[in-house]
Image (tube, rainbow, N blue to C red):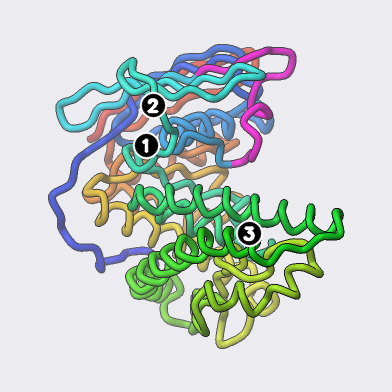
Amino acid sequence: LLIINCFVSLPLQMMFLKQISVVNYKNIPSQTYAFSPTINCFVGDNGVGKTNLLDAIYHLGMAKSYFTTSAVQSVRHGEEFYLIEGQFRQEEREEQIVCSLKKGQKKVMKHNGKAYERLADHIGKYPMVLISPSDRDLIVEGSETRRKFLDSVISQTDRAYLELLLRYNRTLLQRNTLLKQMTEGGVFSLETLHIYDEQLAPLGQHIYEKRRAFMEEFLPIFSEQYAYISGGKERVSLHYDSSLHQSDLATQLVENTERDRSAQYTTAGIHKDDLLFEIEGYPMKKYGSQGQQKSFLIALKLSQFEVLKQSLGITPIVLLDDIFDKLDDTRVTQLVQLVTQKHFGQLFITDTHSQRTEDVVKQTGLAYEMIQIGASRTGSKSHKSR
């Protein structure tokens, strides 16, 4: 079902996480784990911290949590800071990444002891792809969730894009604040508003062009992935929806001046873009079965993996969170076999059933670690490849 032969052979840098130390991150008080460069399984009861450990790994690569938007929410209850330290191996190099946050202060990321001036400079060095039951939000939630996914993938492949996005969002906030202040003050200055228009328009236009170019590359990969996963049983589509398809942002800002004045915020721009998920021409959210939605999301994430691999020349780390909740045992086996082929790198899996997970990973013939996670018991056992 998931044997995909559309990947091309490229000279890749092999990258994996050797060890992680976590202090006060979510419900993890203080733990250190050593990992296999191939497969690592976190097993244990619900609520013991398996997903939080997976999130700590993701945090090392992306400088943020996958599951929470506020960094301070990741500090363990009753504590004042968290610290995550990872030892990566990339080709023949040993590299240390440290991420720390103290309440009331800015997050700090360090690479080999040197702090980044901007967290954005870290993005793309250690690419990660996480597949989680929470990914269903991409289908059922609003456009902001899908834009974040799109921005996250592009940001890992294009550092200039992330800087453009940060500048756009700052300028947008300033423009929206001005619109509100002018309404509250009873004085509307078109000249002042146009100063922000002149800054916002080129930023938004550039972001739009980058998103459009990315989607042109992404769509064929996604279509082929879904066709293999579904066996070609149905037709799905993925569309980039933007008002900038019709006219440039500078024109739209002028045309929407009165509308913005009434709404007290900017009603047109790339912050309104969306990704449309469809099956047989209808919204996936309404007309897709649970199985079709799961297949769609996995195709989306496998396409993300392939784009990152091709663009960066680095094999991303794959994180599968509670994957048995997402797929039946047979499909999990097929997915794990896919992501452990030679062109894939390090894999992390969380599950509540140790034997079920071990039965799946044994079939790969690769070395793996079974790591028991729990409040009173934490241990691991290693298995070499046959």
Please tell me whether mark 1 sits on a helix, a strand or a loop. helix
User: Where's residue 169, x and y in %?
Assistant: 57, 52
The reply to whether callout 1 and callout 3 are in contact (CB within 8 Å) is no
**Disc 1 residue type?**
Asp
User: Where's residue 265, x and y in %?
Assistant: 73, 62
Q: Is residue 316 left or right of residue 7?
A: right
Q: Quadrant of residue 38?
A: top left
Measuring 61% from the left and 72% from the top, which residue is drawn there?
A: 253
Residue 371 vertical placement versus 300 (above, below): above
Question: Which quarter shows the N terminus?
Answer: bottom left
**Disc 3 residue type?**
Glu
Residue 89 vertical placement versus 317 (above, below): above
Q: Is residue 131 left or right of residue 174?
A: left
User: Where's residue 358, x and y in %?
Assistant: 44, 37
Instruction: Give the Cα distance between marks 1 and 3.
Output: 23 Å
In this rendering, which labeled residue sits more in front, label 1 or label 3?
A: 1
Instruction: Give the Cα distance between marks 2 and 1.
Output: 7 Å
Mark toward the start of the polypeptide (2 vs 1): 2
Q: Is residue 76 magenta?
A: yes
Q: Which residue is mark 3?
A: 144
Residue 66 vertical placement versus 21 (above, below): below
Q: Nearer the viewer, residue 231 or 148?
A: 148
Measuring 38% from the left and 62% from the top, which residue is drawn there?
A: 303
Q: Which residue is mark 1?
A: 121
**Disc 2 residue type?**
Tyr
The reply to whether callout 2 and callout 1 are in contact (CB within 8 Å) is yes
On residue 116, which mark appears? 2
Q: Nearer the viewer, residue 327 or 103?
A: 103
Q: Is residue 381 among what the camera can see?
A: no
**Part of the protein shown in magenta:** 67-83
Mark toward the start of the polypeptide (2 vs 3): 2
Q: Is residue 133 magenta?
A: no
